[in-house]
Image (cartoon, helix red, strand yellow):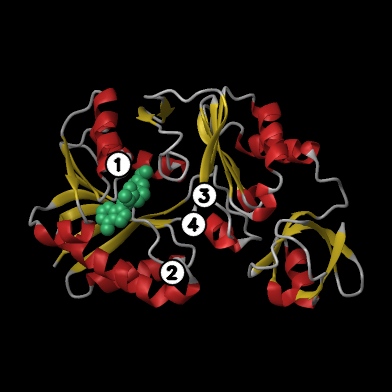
Amino acid sequence: MERVIVDKAGEETIASGHLWVFSNEVRERSADLPAGELVEVHGEKGGFLGIGYINPKSLIMIRLLTRQRIAIDQGFFERRIGNALKLREGHFEGSFRVVNAESDFLPGLVIDKYEDALAIQLLTWGMERQKEMVVAAAERVLSPRIMVLRNESPSRQEEGLSQYTELVKGSVEQGMTIQVGPLRFLVDLMTGQKTGFYFDQRESRLLTKEFAPGATVLDCFSYTCAFGLYALHFGARSATFVDSSAKALELGQENMRINRLSGGEFVRGDVFEFLKGSDREYGLMILDPPSFIKSRKKIKEGERGYIDLHKKALRRLADGAHLFTFSCSHHMKRQRFRDVMRIAAYGKADVYLTRELTQCVDHPVLLTIPETEYLKGLIVRVARR
Ligand code: SAH
């Protein structure tokens, strides 16, 4: 295995518990290392720091797999997946995220479990090159009936990897459903968003129980319509779902049907336009948009988007209404997200913070790797002026 020497800053990052080495922290490496190659990482004084994989074209040049001198073989992946499973024991059964990349010391790898089916994402060159071992290890530890590689994502594009979906085991049935909390949801393993279902919002959706009884609900950026369907299940009077994707709304409609719920209205369109164009007021609103801040350079622009969205949302909230609002951008900091809410309410409303929310524990936040925290949520109560 080739050696790569990192500078003092790189060494300190690794000592602090992080798994990334940035390109400017790499002191010495052979010029011709192919993307995804396993390398030994050493400090300037020669000390062994760990084994990782390199992508010479990426700003995050090395992602560490281990701080020990061990073989990166199928057994390694089996142990890592086994540990990830142990971490989630007692919290989940059936359907959940088994492996969440860096959080589980498997940078670049995501494994979602949909009952006895697995959706696997290899997000980096380093993981792509371990494909066979990863699939074999997942098979061994989790014994799935169906396995799909959902190798489509913006991060793969950034890495210069192709986008593809591949069925590696079993056959995919139409109309497959999973139980998540009190409801069942359809999952499209081959073409659903990300790997098919957002598990990170599982706990937050359950919190609609407190606010749903009798409420008129607006679920914005609804995708599978899980938030609003939970609210209907918990006694909301009606729920309006808004999403720009017709396919998402069809899925939502089907989800309403299979759970024998009623009172849903499905609107295809842009949420900003919808909020501007209607004068109806709601007692409970959910805002769960895609990330508006994809990179550090886009922070200012993204913040303006969030403020604009919240200003528009506030106009549609009745006095005393509750808003569940989320940002899934790592670059939006917790305190700043509160500021977004405060700025949007300026001169219009008094806003109480009822609860702060985060991603569900199958997307573990490792404090030593701040980037593992991305989802921030607020439940606020709005008092109109
Ligand atoms: N709330 C969902 C997840 C939302 S994912 C859940 O609980 O699972 C984000 C969704 O926003 C996607 O379905 C996407 O189609 C939709 N979307 C993105 N931009 C939009 C826009 N400007 N207006 C309406 N929907 C949008």
Q: For disc 3, does the CB lie below 8 Å from ligand 1?
A: no
Q: Earlier in the sequence, mark 2 or mark 4?
A: 4
Labels 3 and 1 touching (C-beta < 8 A):
no
Q: Which mark is residue 163?
A: 3
- Residue under circle 4? 154
From the viewer's side, name the closer residue of 30 and 66: 30
**Secondary structure of residue under mark 1:** helix
Q: Earlier in the sequence, mark 2 or mark 1?
A: 1
Single out the mark in the foreground, 3 or 2. 3
Q: CA distance from mark 1 to mark 4?
A: 20 Å
In this view of the protein, can residue 106 be seen by the observer?
A: no
In this view of the protein, can residue 79 be seen by the observer?
A: yes
Label 3 Cα neighbours within 10 Å, binned few <14 / some 14-19 / many ≥20: few
Q: Earlier in the sequence, mark 3 or mark 4?
A: 4
Q: Residue at x 13, y 68 (%)?
A: 385
Labels 3 and 4 touching (C-beta < 8 A):
no
Q: Is residue 163 left or right of residue 218?
A: right
In the rendering, at what x and y percent does residue 1 appear?
87, 56
**Secondary structure of residue under mark 2:** helix
Q: Earlier in the sequence, mark 3 or mark 2?
A: 3
Q: Label 1 sits on what residue type?
A: Ala
Q: Earlier in the sequence, mark 3 or mark 1?
A: 3
Q: Which mark is residue 335?
A: 2
Q: Residue at x 49, y 52 (%)?
A: 153
Labels 2 and 1 touching (C-beta < 8 A):
no
Q: CA distance from mark 2 to mark 4?
A: 27 Å
Q: Label 4 sits on what residue type?
A: Pro
